[in-house]
Amino acid sequence: MSDNEFSDSKLVVLALAQDEPSAFGELVRRHQSAVRHFLRHLCGDAAQADDLAQDTFVNAFRSLRQFRGQSSFLTWLLGIAHNRYRNARRLKREVLFAPADLPEADPTVPEQQRSDLRSDLADALRLLDPDEQTAVHLFYHQDLSHPEIASITGWPLGTVKTYLARAKEKLRPFLQAWNPKL
């Protein structure tokens, strides 16, 4: 089965019908990077994120009949991943944002300055509460819309907007030196 032979929806149908045993495997291959990236940003621990990603896909396979196609398959998966993360966070009571997992800065900026910016950004992100961190990651790193974030997290749309607004307000004073226009 080629990577783009079928849409996600078609692969879900095939996986449920068990006509194509590799259908769910193809869904995993398509979306594992996005799920792992999301969880690594939330956890700050690559090993824990990989464990949670595996749990996400096991849970998704077991719950595949619950996928209704009202959102993209990836949005549905990220919702499961977010729930796995929240459950783990409740058990651990610790959340970290790893500087190594932050996106790369502008390559035209000197390395020392990029390193300083990444460090300042990591420090600033640690000031956010876990829900604000989640909203920031989904919006800025995953490029998801407010309604998609609401679908993933189960938060009302207004709550998503509030978390993003609060996060921006908290981050502004710490990052203003990098962009005085903030």
Image: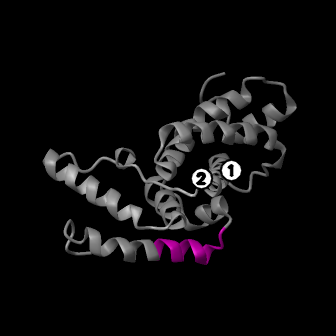
Residue 57: image x %, image y %?
Answer: 68, 38
Look at 78% across and 48% down and name the residue there.
Answer: 67
Examine the rendered structure and indicate whether residue 31 appears above or below residue 176: above
Q: Main secondary structure of the magenta part?
A: helix
Check the image and tell me how it is coloured.
one colour
Q: Residue at x 56, y 37 (%)?
A: 50
Q: Residue 174: horizontal and vertical position, in percent?
A: 28, 70
Per the image, the residue denoted by label 2 is: 92
Q: Of residues 55 and 164, which is closer to you in this image?
A: 55
Question: Is residue 166 toward the left or the right of residue 82 in the image?
Answer: left
Residue under the image location 21 percent in, 68 percent down: 179
Q: Quadrant of the N terminus?
A: top right
The residue shown at (43%, 59%) is: 140
Image location of residue 165, percent across then percent down: 45, 76
- Judged from the image, the secondary structure of the residue bearing numbered disc 2 is helix
| Mark in front: 2 vs 1 | 2
Tell me, yes or no, whether the two marked residues, 2 and 1, touch with CB atoms within 8 Å.
no
151 within the magenta span: no
Judged left or right of residue 43, residue 56 is: right
As displayed, is residue 113 above or below residue 171? above
Q: Is residue 63 left or right of residue 95?
A: right
> Quick check: can you spot residue 141?
yes
- Most extreme residue toward the right is 17
Quadrant that contains the C terminus = bottom left
Of label 2 and label 1, which has the lower sequence position? 1
Magenta stretch: give its range: 155-165
Q: On the image, numbered disc 1 is attached to which residue?
A: 80
Name the amino acid type tagged 2.
Lys
